[in-house]
Amino acid sequence: MISLPYILLSILWFSLIAYAVFGGADFGAGVWDTLAFGPNAQRQHDLIDEALGPVWETNHVWLIFLVVGLFSAFPAPFAVLVTVLYIPLTLALIGVSLRGSAFIFRTHGLRSDKPARKIWTRIFSFSSIITPFFLGLAAATVASGQIRAREGVGQVNLGAFILTPFALTIGFMAIALCATLAAIFLTVEATDKKDHELAEVFRWRANSRAWRSWPSTLSVGSTPFMARYASSCHAYRHRDNDYWLSGSGHIVLQVLPDRTSVDCR
């Protein structure tokens, strides 16, 4: 029988996927904005601005829904997660704020001939890269199974876990995933605008094996380290329930009533 926690987790997981797809494409557009060079660079900037204009702010509604839902449905695991991951999550939040401000200033607040517009463009591009990277670090830390809590207080050597080859690989893979999603969406956007040259440029980027496979290449060298962190899981007790924050390559949040420990190997 499906219980209420599983229903709530399914809804939250759907919102996470939605944010990864739509918000990821949003961040990926900033990656391509950074890499826009050559004779058609300005056309790429204009295409990205037109594609992001109607949706860049609404995409973060999925993130807000996820955070509020996790806080409301599972307050104890939420408290542990935001405490343990406060460094990467804070940096990601700063990136989201800077990115939105920079996009508005460069698109609507300044003329193209103003020197400050180039500065805001670089801020927009830089924050579009660091935000998915730190979100990937946070996800990798959860997936490693090394988050522990005693009496509701999270305990983890954060510096050691966010700088592992596993966490860094997932961070770079998050950037690559966002860039791939953005290239797909921009291909459709350019096709709708009858700009076949840009459509082919972004289609090639979306299909480029070199771009999509380089995070996997990094992961090959870090496989022994990944195995170390993905081979175990931990549980902690909070009042009447245990909450398991773990998963071998997955992010799992599960309520385990009437148990005091979990051992997964």
Image (tube, rainbow, N blue to C red):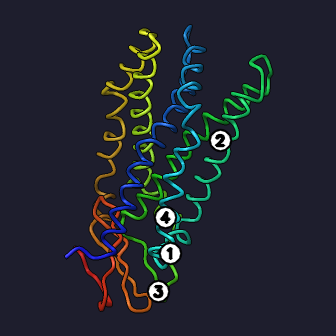
Residue 109 at x, y percent in the picture: 77, 29
Label 2–label 1 contact, CB within 8 A = no
Residue on which disc 1 sits? 80
Q: CA distance from mark 2 to mark 1?
A: 28 Å
Q: Residue at x 53, y 70 (%)?
A: 84
Residue 17 in percent (x, y) is at: 38, 51
In this view, the mark in front (2 or 4): 2
Q: Position of residue 184 (x, y in %)?
A: 38, 28
Q: Earlier in the sequence, mark 2 or mark 1?
A: 1
The residue identified by callout 2 is: 100
Task: Judge depth for marks 1 and 3 and give the one in front.
Answer: 1
Q: As displayed, is residue 137 above or below residue 232?
A: above
**What is the CA distance from the residue labelled 4 to the residue labelled 1?**
18 Å
Q: Residue at x 55, y 10 (%)?
A: 40
Judged from the image, the secondary structure of the residue bearing numbered disc 1 is helix
Q: Residue at position x 39%, y 92% from top? A: 240
Q: Nearer the viewer, residue 5 or 119?
A: 5
Q: Nearer the viewer, mark 2 or mark 3?
A: 2
Q: Earlier in the sequence, mark 2 or mark 3?
A: 2
Looking at the image, which residue is at 30% across and 92% down?
258
Report, in whole angstroms, how far the alpha carbon at label 2 lies from the one at label 4. 31 Å
Residue that extends furthest to the left in the rendered view of this protein: 1
Q: Amino acid at mark 3?
A: Arg
Task: Tell me the quarter of the image containing the C terminus.
Answer: bottom left
Q: Which residue is mark 4?
A: 160
For the residue labelled by badge 2, is the local secondary structure a helix, a strand or a loop? helix
Image disc number at residue 150: 3
- Residue type at the position of mark 2: Gly
- Compared across the picture, whether 2 is left or right of 229 comes to left
Of callouts 1 and 3, the N-terminal one: 1
Element type at marker 3?
Answer: strand
